[in-house]
């Protein structure tokens, strides 16, 4: 049986935008025109306290860089090429890294440029359907530079609040610990998204068991596409974080690597959850097809029983529908009972008896009313 869907569920982020054209020179910065102009937010902290401000002009950044031990500069939006290039000059960012920042289609990875480490990850959110946003993080000796695009908002609110409250170790450690905190926040943001899909799968499972219909297939395809997108986002992050924990770098202290190994464990857990939910989605699709097949079989059984009941009745009605007259003594082999006073009632009575007899037979064979038979059997066992 073929199933026709009213619409094909869209797979988010499978259509990649803003790629450089084939044959273009490396390091070419071509921002997405749909992106807003960059907004710059700075949080600097250290022994002297915490300073937080918005920077309207990128040229005002150098005055804020070395007043505290750690400076976190966050840029939202890539709509202005001059601002991006000015930031590259100011922090000595490689052109290839800037190209990756603007392109917004990169897999998670780690690039070590000696005095800078470039980290690409994807943050997850779920306003309605799962969505991932590229996070570009540059780790320097006394600063963190992050680039974000896409919809407003991120998963770093708690990190910002910890810095404002000067709570925990974050204000007494270097930029490498801040980088860990941001990576950990981006990874942990996958848990609430997966929790949402866990609840959706539970709901779909109940619907498949109770009232399967064609709309469920669309919902299952949507969940499958979203989980595939999450898998494509989280899977490369495992190798990227493992690279940080394995390879030595002057930018990351040994005691910070212990925390990064915990991030690696979280990624492994998330990958396992995604794979589990994908398998559950496939199982629900199989269950849906089985339930639909059972419904079709039940319908065909009822129709077959009805057709079988009418076969002898149609046979009797067909015989008497031939209209052969009967005259006693003249045509002894012609149609009997045509002129009998109660012939019509007798014929209908025979049909009713046949129908009731067939229903009793079907019932005893268990072909009809199986639930009623089960209840009666349970009652008889209870009384006995």
Image: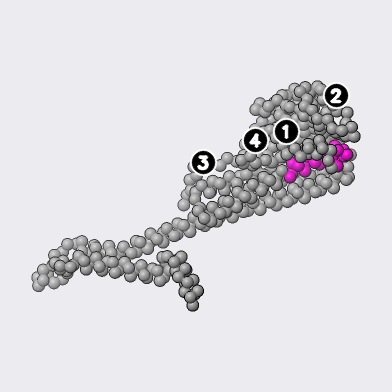
Label 2 SS: helix
For marks 2 and 1, give the one nearer the viewer: 2
Residue 259 inside the magenta-drawn segment:
no
Query: Of the residues under marks 4 and 2, which one precedes in the sequence?
Result: 4
Residue 148's tag is 1
Q: Label 4, on which residue?
A: 16
Q: In terms of sequence position, does the residue under pointer 1 or pointer 4 come before the other?
A: 4
On screen, residue 190 above or below 206: above
Q: Quadrant of residue 367?
A: bottom left
In the image, residue 362 sits, relative to residue 44, either above or below, namely below
Packing grade of label 4 (10 A; few <14, some 14-19, many >=20) is: few
Q: Nearer the viewer, residue 84 or 360?
A: 360
Image quadrant in which you'd find residue 53: top right
Secondary structure state at the residue bearing disc 4: loop
How far apart are the two marked residues, 4 and 2, measured between alpha carbons? 38 Å
Disc marking residue 7? 3
Image x and y of residue 286, in percent: 55, 55
Marks 1, 4: nearer the viewer: 1
Residue 356 picture quarter = bottom left
Tell whether 176 sits left or right of 277.
right
Judged by its main secondary structure, the magenta piece is helix
Foreground mark, 3 or 2?
Answer: 2
Is the residue 297 above or below the residue 184 in the image?
A: below
Q: Do the residues under discs 1 and 4 have CB atoms within 8 angstroms? A: no
Q: Nearer the viewer, residue 109 or 123?
A: 123
- Residue at x 85%, y 45% (from the top left corner): 257
Identify the residue under disc 2.
63
Residue 246 in the image, given as x and y percentages of width and height: 84, 46
């Amino acid at each position: 049986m073929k199933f026709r869907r009213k619409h094909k569920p869209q797979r988010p982020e499978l259509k990649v935008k803003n790629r450089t054209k084939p044959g273009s020179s490396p390091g070419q910065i071509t921002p997405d025109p749909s992106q807003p102009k960059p907004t710059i937010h700075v949080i600097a902290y250290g022994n002297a306290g915490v300073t937080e401000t918005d920077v309207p002009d990128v040229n005002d950044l150098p005055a804020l860089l070395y007043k505290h031990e750690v400076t976190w500069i966050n840029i939202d939006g890539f709509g202005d090429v001059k601002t991006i290039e000015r930031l590259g000059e100011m922090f000595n960012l490689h052109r290839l890294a800037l190209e990756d920042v603007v392109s917004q289609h990169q897999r998670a990875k780690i690039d070590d440029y000696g005095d800078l480490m470039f980290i690409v990850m994807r943050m997850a959110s779920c306003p309605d359907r799962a969505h991932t946003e590229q996070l570009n993080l540059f780790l320097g000796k006394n600063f963190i530079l992050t680039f974000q695009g896409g919809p407003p908002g991120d998963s770093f609110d708690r990190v910002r609040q910890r810095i404002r409250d000067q709570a925990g170790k974050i204000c007494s450690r270097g930029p490498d610990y801040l980088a860990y905190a941001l990576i950990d926040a981006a990874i942990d943001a996958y848990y609430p998204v997966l929790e949402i899909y866990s609840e959706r799968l539970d709901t779909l499972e109940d619907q498949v068991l109770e009232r399967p219909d064609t709309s469920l297939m669309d919902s299952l395809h949507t969940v499958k596409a979203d989980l595939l997108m999450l898998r494509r986002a989280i899977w490369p992050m495992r190798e990227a974080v493992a690279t940080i924990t394995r390879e030595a770098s002057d930018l990351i202290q040994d005691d910070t690597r212990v925390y990064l190994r915990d991030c690696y464990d979280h990624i492994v857990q998330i990958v396992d959850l995604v794979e589990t939910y994908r398998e559950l989605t496939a199982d629900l699709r199989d269950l849906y097809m089985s339930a639909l097949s059972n419904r079709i079989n039940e319908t065909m059984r009822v129709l077959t029983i009805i057709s079988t009941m009418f076969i002898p009745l149609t046979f009797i009605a067909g015989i008497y529908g031939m209209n052969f007259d009967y005259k006693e003594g003249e045509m002894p082999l012609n149609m009997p009972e045509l002129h009998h006073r109660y012939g019509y009632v007798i014929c209908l009575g025979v049909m009713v008896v046949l129908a009731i007899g067939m229903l009793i037979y079907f019932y005893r064979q268990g072909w009809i009313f199986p639930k009623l038979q089960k209840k009666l059997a349970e009652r008889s066992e209870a009384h006995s």
